[in-house]
Image: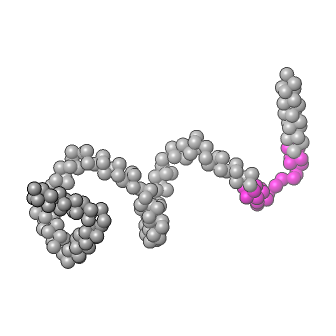
Amino acid sequence: MKTKRTILVILSLLGIFLTSCAANESKGNEVSYEETKKMIVDILKTDEGKKALQEVLSDEQFKQEIIMNQEETKKAIEETLVSEKGKKFWEQQLKDEKFAQAFAKSMEKPFEDLMKGLMNDPEYQKKMMELMQNPEMDKNYTKLIKSSEMRSHFQKLIQETFENPMFKAEIFDMLKKKVLKYQY
């Protein structure tokens, strides 16, 4: 009961304070737009202002309201990705190796999920089979495999494989088993 009385007293004092402030404002102490703007900017620069903004921006309901406005979201995406300015921005950003690497890593899981979904899609499977069986593609594969770049890559790969201690151990074990088999 005592806490209810305390809350009532505090609310009454707050009401009186707000009423007196409103009375002073109506007497001619009007604040200009520029002064109000400056006050708001100053408030937002304080630690309390930053904290309040962080709380608002982290609120799930607020996020949903922002996302739900699909027309504005669509327009923003179009401006960012499709416009010439957006293309230039992404080209510039993707030149930075750290950004490109982080971007690729963030897209890895969604891309993997997309590919897995496509692998199970009969229409996609059919189109992939048509592509792989296309005689022109076969010529391109053969040309690629016979290229000097690919041959040097294969040679380097085979050389690295033979230098691998695990591979050497496996080969040694296989040879040992064959020799022992033919000795008896």
**Residue 36 shown left or right of residue 155 in the figure:** right
Q: Position of residue 162 (x, y in %)?
A: 25, 69
Residue 41 visible: no
Q: Position of residue 15 (x, y in %)?
A: 85, 36
For image coordinates 64% across by 46% down, the residue present is 56
- Magenta residues, dominant SS class: helix
For image coordinates 48% across by 49% down, the residue present is 71
Q: Position of residue 152 (x, y in %)?
A: 23, 76
Give the quarter of the figure containing the N terminus.
Answer: top right
Q: With respect to residue 4, does 129 lie above or below? A: below
Q: Position of residue 109 (x, y in %)?
A: 39, 52
Residue lying furthest bottom in this view? 148
**Residue 55 shown left or right of residue 6 in the figure:** left
**Residue 78 shown left or right of residue 57 in the figure:** left
For image coordinates 48% across by 65% down, the residue present is 99
Q: With respect to residue 124, does 139 lie above or below? A: below
Magenta span includes 34: yes
Q: Which residues are magenta?
A: 22-46
Residue lying furthest top in this view? 1
Give the quarter of the figure containing the C terminus.
Answer: bottom left
Front-lying residue, 106 or 40 = 106
For image coordinates 70% across by 51% down, the residue present is 51
Q: With respect to residue 24, does 37 lie above or below? A: below
Q: Quadrant of residue 145?
A: bottom left
Magenta span includes 145: no
Colouring style: one colour
Residue 147 visible: yes
